[in-house]
Image (cartoon, rainbow, N blue to C red):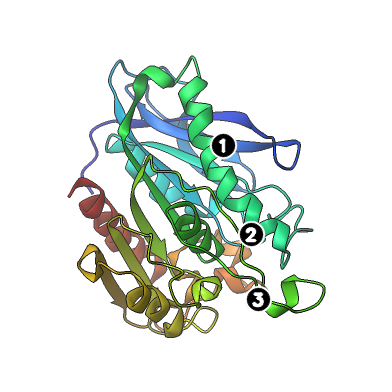
Amino acid sequence: MENDKYSGLKKVEVVDDYLDVTFPMLVLYPTETPEKEEKIGPYLVDVSLDAKLEDERYPLVVISHGTGGTPLVYRHLARDLAKRGFIVAMPEHPFNNVKDNQLERTTKLLRSRPKNITQVIDWFDHSDSFKDHINFEDISIIGHSMGGYTAIAVTGGTPTTLPWETGNETPERIDVDVDERIKKVILFAPALGWFRNEGALEKVNVPIFIMTGERDEITPSFHAEILLNGVINREKIVHKVFENAGHFSFLSPFPPEMKVTSFPPSQDPEGFNRELFQQELAADVLSFLLS
């Protein structure tokens, strides 16, 4: 990707009035201030901390990470988008992240995750630093794995619980507020089993780019089929299957010391080049966002 600007980075806190907590969020954005290498969590990233935001309006992209994950594993994609003129929000979902995952496999999580996305957009709408720099008519969401659930739920999907998420194993429909400010959805290996019921996706009516891995054993092909068969306007969906890609191939490459078999997110099917794939992924994402 040809880059026009540098990537600025701010660390902020967002209020979650449903769980009554605040959660951290990284914001990457275009800047003219040169980058330098910074240690963000366990990773080294070239960014310009707290740099000046240029006096323009930019599209907003929210990235929703997978269950028990961290937004930092999408750092390469986020930085590429920021350098190409996007403001990128990377929230850490409360109680469903690498540091604290107590809400995993609960009904409460199904309710809270979509709310986080609306809370993020509201934060920008009230932020003195960013509100005048956001094009609120051009907001997109990228969701990986459980982030895919989040993206579909907040754009009109009606989820129903899975057996282990309720005390009596009785399916329960989850009411989710749709955020109509979101105009496009990009899904990486999405987890969509919650939308298996007939009619669950009939209100989803935004352009969707779904990317899946041929060798994904965590969210295999039936997840994509739920979406492809459930959305009424099939013409709004683009589906791309990446040859030999696994579930975690969509994450930024990990440092050599983290590439061990005991850490599945660092692993890919044999012969898969994650570093090269990230370039193709970023180009595909940018093309869809600009279309």
Task: Quote the CA–CA distance across marks 3 and 1.
Answer: 25 Å
Q: What residue type is labelled 3?
A: Leu
Task: Quote the CA–CA distance across marks 3 and 2.
Answer: 10 Å
User: In the image, what residue occupies the spot 29% across and 24% down?
Assistant: 57
Q: Which residue position is annotated with label 3?
A: 162
Q: In which quarter of the image is residue 257?
A: bottom right
Q: Residues within 10 Å of mark 3 (few under 14, many from 20)?
A: some
Side (left or right) of 33 relative to 90: left
Mark 2, secondary structure of its residue: helix
Q: In the depicted view, which residue is nearer to us: 145 or 39?
A: 145
In the figure, 46 relative to 141: above or below? Answer: above
Q: In the depicted view, which residue is nearer to us: 169 or 288?
A: 169
Q: Position of residue 73 (x, y in %)?
A: 53, 55
Q: Which residue position is annotated with label 2?
A: 110
Q: Position of residue 81 (x, y in %)?
A: 33, 43
Q: Earlier in the sequence, mark 3 or mark 2?
A: 2
Q: Position of residue 263 (x, y in %)?
A: 65, 71
In the figure, 2 relative to 98: above or below? Answer: above
Q: Quadrant of residue 55?
A: top left
User: In the image, what residue occupies the spot 45% across and 44% down?
Assistant: 179
User: In the image, what residue occupies the spot 53% across and 28% down?
Assistant: 123
Q: Which of marks 3 and 1 is in front?
A: 3
User: In the image, what residue occupies the spot 23% across and 49% down?
Assistant: 1
Residue extending farthest to the right is 167
Q: Residues within 10 Å of mark 1 (few under 14, many from 20)?
A: some
Which dot marks residue 119? 1
Which dot marks residue 99? none
Q: Which of marks 1 and 2 is nearer the N terminus?
A: 2
Asked whether residue 46 is in view, the answer is yes
Q: Position of residue 213 (x, y in %)?
A: 39, 77
Task: Quote the CA–CA distance across marks 1 and 2.
Answer: 15 Å
Q: What residue type is labelled 1?
A: Gln
